[in-house]
Image (cartoon, rainbow, N blue to C red):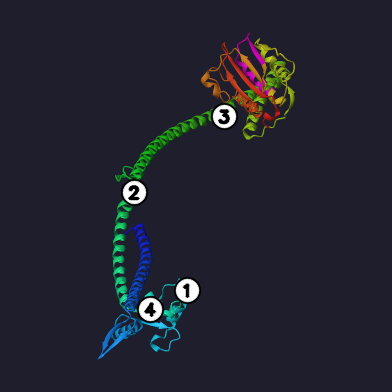
Amino acid sequence: MFSPLERKLLFSLALVLATFWLIFVWWSIKKQEQFFVEQMHREAQGIYQYITLTREWISSHGGIYIKQGKKIVLITPSHFTKDLADFASPKNLPFTFKVAVLHTQNPNHRPNVFEKKAIQKFQDPRVKEYWRYVKKEKKFLYAAPLRFQNVCYQCHSYMKDYKPPACISVTLSAKPFIKELRMNYQMLILASILITLLIFGVLFFFLRHFVLKPLHIFIRVSRNIEQGNLNGRVNINTGDEWEELSNCFNKMIDSLISHQEKLEEKIKEATRELHIAYEELKKIESFRSEFFSNITHDLKTPVTAIKGAIDLLDRKGQLDSRYLEIVRKNIEKLSKMIKDLLDCAKLESGQMELLLEENNIIAAINDAIFLVMPMAKEKDIDLDFNPKKEKINIVFDYEKIQQVITNLLTNAIKFTPPNTKIIIQVEEFPQEIRVSIEDFGPGIPEEEWPLVFKKFYQSSRTKRKGIGLGLAICKGIIEAHGGKIWVERPKHQGIIFYFSLPKKRGSVGE
């Protein structure tokens, strides 16, 4: 059985070879027919030349004498031509000839239609012959002028400048030629069919051996690969493009195996990362539970303190400034926690709106210092801020940036030892304003720097003093302005918090 491609090749080869065979046979038949027509033409020329030569010979001898019965008769070229034609007629020769003359009374020399046309053409001295092959009648008609030679003028001197309206016509039977032509046709068709079939078989053999066989090898190996067997290889050693293609195919399989191994390794790595992420998620869930437990505790503590102070005031029936201070501080603490939670929620949902106006960053820092000054005085901490300029105007949300500075200062005060200082600086650059807050506290381990701005994060070197939203809120506000916030280590113990704000409004996120 042949494959679909083999059937297509067989059909295509058969169609192409059949087309060429038909064209070749048609061309060969035409050439054979031309050959036989030319052969009849040459035979007719030979007969005409033989008759003309005989007439010339007879004329050169002044005629010939022949014996007819008891008489001796002079035969002229004209008599010879007529007598020879009459003599040849009953012999069933494959040709006949005669002298055709216009305006003659002799019926033997009266021209037919072909001969009349030939005589008309011969009036032009450049026309040497006229012939026609009548295929339907299977005849070849040939005519050439009847011309007088020099020897003829000895007896016909009066016709020296005369163009006789006559010709010698030869009629050949084409039947023998047609019979031979048909035999040639049969031999040609038979031989061409055999040769075409041989060419067809040889071409298909070579196509099957050099094209289809390697292709079937590729198909077999490709099917094995499709089923998941990557160990198969194509081994073709033909020294041609098929061998080059097999080498490329084998390299492609090797590359596929390598890629598969890398992909399996990546899947394993992704699985490990997914497992780690799952463990992290479990930790986050645990942290979330701990956060809610802590925030419940943090919210419960000021509420309990407020409730206790109110109960004491109620029992005593009089106001006590100490208890009122407890109530005030715990209400402020509770208010800050709630505000931080609300700000964090707004940042996450993208609902925080900025009131962007041109403001003085120096004034914002001074106002923040003023707000945290009581907390700093309780620990005898000096807030060192000595700007080089009194005004640096840029576009920002005054209240939000003041909140950022206040949060950073509050954290610095919380973790800075008493009787020390906190250094606040402002630097102006071509594209931005940079603010730094440097403290002398326990500092933050460098490996924790990327984590300090995450929600609910508490440094490992500090005791828990809040819910861990302050720095996350600072980061959200600064980035909403199109700025950056980061941490660096000073030359002494402690930490430096930096944040930058763009000077141009076009750089501000809105």
Left or right for 281, reference 6? right
Q: Which residue is mark 2?
A: 218
- Image quadrant containing the N terminus: bottom left
Residue depicted at x 40% and y 82%: 100
Q: CA distance from mark 1 to mark 4?
A: 25 Å
Q: Nearer the viewer, residue 467 or 307?
A: 467
Q: Is residue 423 magenta?
A: yes
Q: Is residue 262 magenta?
A: no
- Which residue extends farthest left? 70
Residue 1 makes an appearance in the image: no
The label shown at residue 441 is: none
Q: CA distance from mark 2 to mark 3?
A: 65 Å
Left or right for 11, reference 403? left
Q: Which residue is mark 4?
A: 154
Relative height, residue 233 to residue 41 (above, below):
above
Relative height, residue 379 to residue 236 (above, below):
above
Mark 2 or mark 3: which comes first in sequence? 2
Quarter of the figure with residue 338: top right
